[in-house]
Image (cartoon, rainbow, N blue to C red):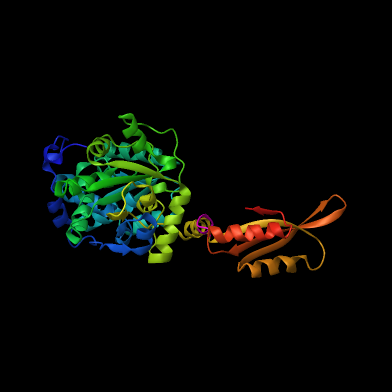
């Protein structure tokens, strides 16, 4: 880590002004207030506060960088219009920022983008062009249109003015609580953590800034470990908002100097964090947005004041449903199992009595698969029950074993 008093060696960093950016954003964004979390504090052995950027107008932090960038364009540049490629939060943030500043915005989105995201982007006044089957193809089309039409391309993370806008999050955090020890930040392309890290360490060089990436898309961590930008062949994570194959060269350089370290989390840990945030705080976070909460168990620091930035909450209802179900399983809140029963009266009652005696509440039961085994008929019973945690599950399974049942957990 460089000495922050002598670190103005990145191109463009000498002109960065987070307070000016904060003033530009006044009245445009919500200054999201910190929320103390008893549950995440208990689970991580730290004093944890949530920075809920999922409560922004567009449901994510992206409006900060996009508005800051467009507002700094010259009159001539604004008249050309802006363009970007995005399948998610950058599209909506840029569209709203452009609308508020009276600038024409064109967003190229992959054809596979969910209709709800396309319509949300259009609702902010942007022209949406559907092109290609993935982000990379949409990006190439946006670059082509930039050259053909003369638009100003707004990069989602590899841009100093965008980074400056994202850094206003640190200003707000430290205006509320001055003695914060650590800030945890989701990492995709690196724009958010770059801004947060520079701003935080310019105010207090002792603050630790820790990045969190999904195990299936840890391009930035691998780049730092290799001391060069690494391009992933593929990404595989439920956190689609940070599924970046190649980090930006600018953000890589900044993170290398300003971020203390990066931890990685599994998809199941992400789903658990989503579930806890929803259940305990009544807040909806998208999978990429809750990375910082999932990462709390992975950090080395204990008994510290920690802020976890929840970067966004744009998630569709079907995804929420699937995420909740998997999160319940991961935390031992539900148990799904199958058992083979002899096809005769009273067998189902025996199972029900065992479940009642171990205080497992039946959520779903399917007695629907007949199959012939040797000389007699058996029924495969599938049961889903509500449980009180992993110890409760162990007890349930041990009781079934004592009663002579061969249980298969699904």
Q: Position of residue 94 (x, y in %)?
A: 28, 51
Asked if one can make out residue 189 in the rendered structure from this viewpoint, the answer is: no
User: Toward the viewer: 58 or 300?
Assistant: 300
Quarter assignment of residue 28: bottom left
* Magenta stretch encompasses residue 103: no
Q: Is residue 107 left or right of residue 9?
A: right
Name the image quarter holding the N terminus. Answer: top left
Quarter assignment of residue 244: top left
Q: Position of residue 104 (x, y in %)?
A: 25, 51
User: Toward the viewer: 255 or 72?
Assistant: 255
Quarter assignment of residue 377: bottom right
Q: Position of residue 85 (x, y in %)?
A: 34, 44
Q: Is residue 106 left or right of residue 21?
A: right
Secondary structure mostly seen in magenta is helix
Is residue 120 shown above or below 257?
Answer: below
**Residue sticking out furthest to the front:** 402
Residue range highlighted in magenta: 328-332
Write the residue at 61% across / 60% down: 395
User: Toward the viewer: 139 or 352?
Assistant: 352
């Amino acid at each position: 880590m460089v000495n922050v008093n002598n670190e103005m060696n990145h191109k463009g960093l000498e002109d960065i002004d987070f307070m000016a950016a904060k003033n530009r954003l006044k009245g445009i964004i919500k200054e999201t207030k910190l929320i103390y979390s008893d549950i995440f504090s208990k689970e991580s052995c730290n004093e944890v506060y949530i920075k809920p950027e999922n409560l922004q107008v567009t449901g994510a932090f992206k409006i900060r960088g996009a508005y800051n960038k467009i507002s700094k364009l010259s009159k001539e540049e604004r008249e050309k219009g802006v363009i970007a490629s995005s399948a998610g939060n950058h599209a909506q943030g840029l569209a709203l920022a452009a609308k508020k500043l009276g600038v024409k915005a064109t967003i190229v989105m992959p054809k596979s983008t969910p209709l709800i995201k396309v319509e949300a982007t259009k609702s902010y006044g942007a022209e949406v062009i559907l092109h290609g089957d993935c982000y990379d193809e949409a990006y190439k089309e946006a670059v082509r249109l930039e050259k053909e039409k003369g638009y100003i391309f707004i990069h989602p993370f590899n841009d100093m003015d965008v980074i400056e806008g994202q850094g206003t999050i640190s200003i707000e955090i430290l205006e509320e609580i001055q003695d914060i020890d650590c800030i945890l930040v989701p990492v995709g392309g690196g724009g958010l953590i770059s801004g947060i890290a520079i701003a935080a360490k310019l105010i207090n060089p002792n603050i630790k800034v820790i990045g969190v990436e999904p195990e299936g898309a840890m391009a930035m961590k691998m780049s730092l470990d290799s001391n060069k930008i690494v391009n992933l062949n593929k990404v595989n994570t439920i956190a689609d908002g940070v599924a970046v194959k190649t980090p930006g060269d600018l953000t890589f350089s900044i993170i290398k100097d300003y971020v203390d370290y990066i931890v990685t989390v599994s998809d199941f840990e992400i789903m658990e964090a989503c579930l806890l945030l929803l259940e305990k705080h009544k807040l909806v976070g998208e999978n990429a947005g809750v990375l910082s909460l999932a990462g709390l168990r992975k950090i080395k620091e204990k008994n510290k004041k920690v802020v976890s930035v929840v970067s966004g909450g744009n998630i569709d209802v079907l995804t929420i449903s699937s995420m909740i179900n998997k999160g319940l399983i991961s935390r031992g809140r539900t148990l799904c199992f199958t058992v083979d029963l002899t096809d005769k009266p009273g067998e189902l009652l025996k199972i029900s009595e065992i479940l009642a005696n171990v205080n497992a509440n039946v959520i779903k039961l399917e007695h629907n698969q007949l199959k012939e085994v040797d000389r007699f008929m058996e029924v495969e019973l599938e049961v889903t029950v509500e449980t009180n945690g992993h110890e409760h599950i162990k007890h349930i399974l041990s009781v079934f074993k004592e009663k002579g049942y061969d249980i298969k957990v699904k």
